[in-house]
Image (cartoon, rainbow, N blue to C red):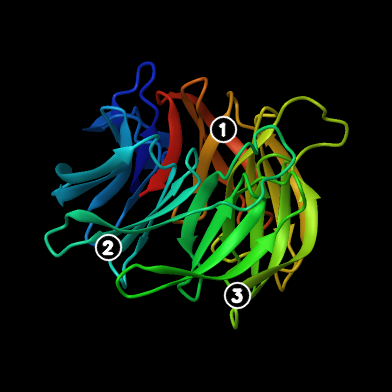
Amino acid sequence: MLEQILLGTYTRRESKGIYQITLDTEKETLSDATLLVEETSPTYLAIDQKGDLFNVTSVDGEGGMAAYKNNDGHFDLINKVTEAGAPPCYVAIDEEKQLVFGANYHQGIVHVYRILADGHLEDTDKIVHDEATGPHENQDNAHVHYTDLTPDRRLAVCDLGTDRVYTYDVSRDGKLSEVAQYVAEPGTGPRHLVFHPNNQFAYLFGELDSTVTVLAYNAADGSFEQVQKVSTLPDGFNEFNGGAAIRISADGRFVYASNRGHDSIAVFATADDGSKVERVQLISTEGEIPRDFDLDPTGKFVVAANQNTDNLTLYRRNEETGLLEMIQKDVYAPECVCVYFK
């Protein structure tokens, strides 16, 4: 079976935009990446149910979101919505309400865009965080890093700068109203979040202290409560590290988290009810700064992107043990920071 993967990138060196690469699940190989959409630093992207593409963009010093129409696998620009300042760093889609969410790290802003009937995007709301920030040097101000739906279709927002996870109700027209805040331990730096399939627990990756925090989720009021906190690093590792991507297997039995600095993927087995995790593996990403990775739709493979060394690494995944085995490395992908299976 051939699986198509889109790759979001920075365009500071050799990259030209969004690339596409093929995973052959029978041969267990990745092919060479080819340029799909020429864009300026499309660092994150998402595709809706119609196959249309939404990605981070930068235009003449302004940052924002771009919409592309899918025409038989080719993407034609619909429009771009930008404003002064740096672009967002995360993209998520609400199919039911036809909304796109963006996390603006540099400005501490939650963006909401509406998808119009003709596919165009327009601004509909934004929230600027102004809560107190944490003690780490990278917490100089609010830094929104993740904006995505909870299982009950609220919006969960991770803010690295304020050490908080915010929960918002989302109206039909895309207006946000805050319903809860989870305050993490100082210096955690909440980056990304994934939910267990039972919808009762979530796993928060702390970029600044390289930890996974197990959170109990209360759907009645949208609140989170800490249950457990574990490191993604080996004992005694004292060099630089920054947490990056976190993923969960479809059956909820395993959580994966990438370390930038230690340059590895930490594998955790979850308790049957999702309330606890235990690290069972640390495996090298065979490159530097693994900004993102993802499990393929079959759950049998993992693809990791090493930003600084311009390479992808392919792993075979044991579905019973969760353990990874490296089967291919040094697959060229320039400045890749987002791995997205179509």
The picture places residue 260, in percent across and down from the top left corner, at 63, 31
Q: Amino acid at mark 3?
A: Asn
Q: Nearer the viewer, residue 321 or 196?
A: 196
| Mark closer to the chain start, 2 or 1 | 2
In the image, is residue 20 above or below residue 248? above
The picture places residue 30, in percent across and down from the top left corner, at 40, 34
Regarding mark 3 in the picture, which secondary structure is present there?
loop
Q: Amino acid at mark 2?
A: Gln
Q: Is residue 253 visible?
A: no
Q: Residue furthest right?
A: 236
Please identify the quarter of the rendering in which residue 245 is found.
Answer: top right
Rounded to the nearest angstrom, the CA distance separating label 2 from label 3 is 23 Å
Q: Is 226 positioned to the left or the right of 119 in the image?
A: right
Regarding mark 1 in the picture, which secondary structure is present there?
strand
Rounded to the nearest angstrom, the CA distance separating label 1 from label 3 is 28 Å
Residue receiving disc 2? 49
Residue at image location 72% in from the left, 39% down from the top: 282
Residue receiving disc 3? 198
Regarding mark 2 in the picture, which secondary structure is present there?
loop
Q: Amino acid at mark 1?
A: Pro
Q: Residues within 10 Å of mark 2 (few under 14, many from 20)?
A: few
Residue receiving disc 1? 290
Residue at image location 72% in from the left, 41% down from the top: 210
Which numbered disc covers residue 152?
Answer: none
Query: Do labels 2 and 3 touch, CB within 8 Å?
Result: no
Q: Residues within 10 Å of mark 1 (few under 14, many from 20)?
A: many
The picture places residue 73, in percent across and down from the top left corner, at 18, 46
Q: Is residue 35 visible?
A: yes
The picture places residue 78, in percent across and down from the top left corner, at 14, 47
Rounded to the nearest angstrom, the CA distance separating label 2 from label 1 is 28 Å
